[in-house]
Image: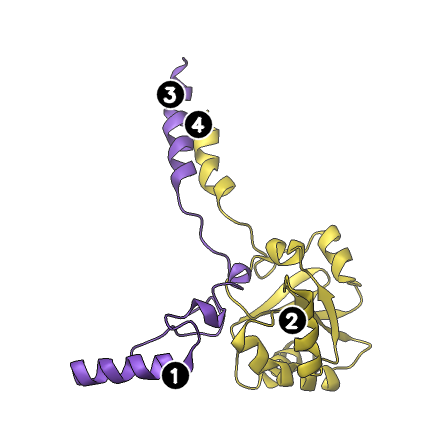
Chain colours: A purple, B yellow
Amino acid sequence: MSRPFLFLLPVLVLSGCSVKDVKPWEKEDLASPRMQRDGGNKLMRQYQEHIYFSKEGTKGGIGVAGGGCGCN
Amino acid sequence: MKVLFLLLPVLTSGFAYDIGETIPDDIAGRIGMERSKVYIIDFFASWCGSCAKEMSDLNRLHERLDPDRYELVGIEIDKDRSKAAAFRQQHRIAFRVIEDSERTIVTAFNPVGMPTLYIVENGKVTHIVTGARNRLDRVVLDYLKETHE
């Protein structure tokens, strides 16, 4: 086996394992309300926020920011 | 072999049109671009909240542009055609829209976010606006006024 090929082999193998980034135009499914923690159920979200507020004495910081813009 | 190693980062990274770069003829043909006009190309999708916000601004911009010199073109990247049609109807989109459900045009432009607006003149990108802006119509008109009047 030639030496350059031995150098190139790990690069090719490792690049195959790398996670490909999601492009901004591929976020259709990620932007779906079903992808939220509560599955888009408003009542469930309010219920969970109430429990969180009762236990932690604080609220907010729940959910995902942005409306599909990949620049956030 | 050394050249191959040096080219690896270039080959594995995405290509995007930056300011000053020329749009290839096949992509320009898909958009239906003529050399005599300045094109304002906006990428949007029905699932993108920021895109929905800027639609009224884009409709206003379309009304205010001189059709002999400028054209606003929307590139709709929805896979679901029914959702795309409903979005167009809901926002009463008046400008020309190209359906890019196969994502050929958007992949070629490779914008960093949604929505992104490109201004293309003589086949070259002259300005890029990324993300939703307050009164996008004014942002674009101010730019066109600065550069063309």
* Front label number (2 vs 4): 2
Tell me which amino acid carries mark 4: Lys
Answer whether residue B40 is visible to the viewer in this image: no
> Which residue sits at x=74%, y=86%?
B63
Tell me which amino acid carries mark 2: Lys
Label drawn at residue B2: 4
- Circle 2 SS class: helix
Crowdedness near tag 2: few (<14), some (14–19) or many (≥20) residues, C-alpha within 10 Å: some
Residue B39: % across, % down: 71, 69
* Front label number (4 vs 1): 1
Residue A46: % across, % down: 34, 84
Mark 1 and mark 2 on one chain:
no
Quarter assignment of residue B128: bottom right
Q: How many angstroms separate mark 2 from mark 3 (CA)?
A: 50 Å
> Which residue sits at x=38%, y=17%?
A3
> Which residue sits at x=73%, y=62%?
B122
Q: Do the residues labelled 4 and 1 touch (CB within 8 Å)?
A: no
Crowdedness near tag 1: few (<14), some (14–19) or many (≥20) residues, C-alpha within 10 Å: few
| Residue assigned mark 1 | A43
Mark 3 and mark 4 on one chain:
no
Label drawn at residue B83: 2
Mark 3 and mark 1 on one chain:
yes
Q: Nearer the viewer, residue B1 or B29?
A: B29
* Front label number (3 vs 1): 1
Q: Do the residues labelled 3 and 4 touch (CB within 8 Å)?
A: no
Quarter assignment of residue A45: bottom left
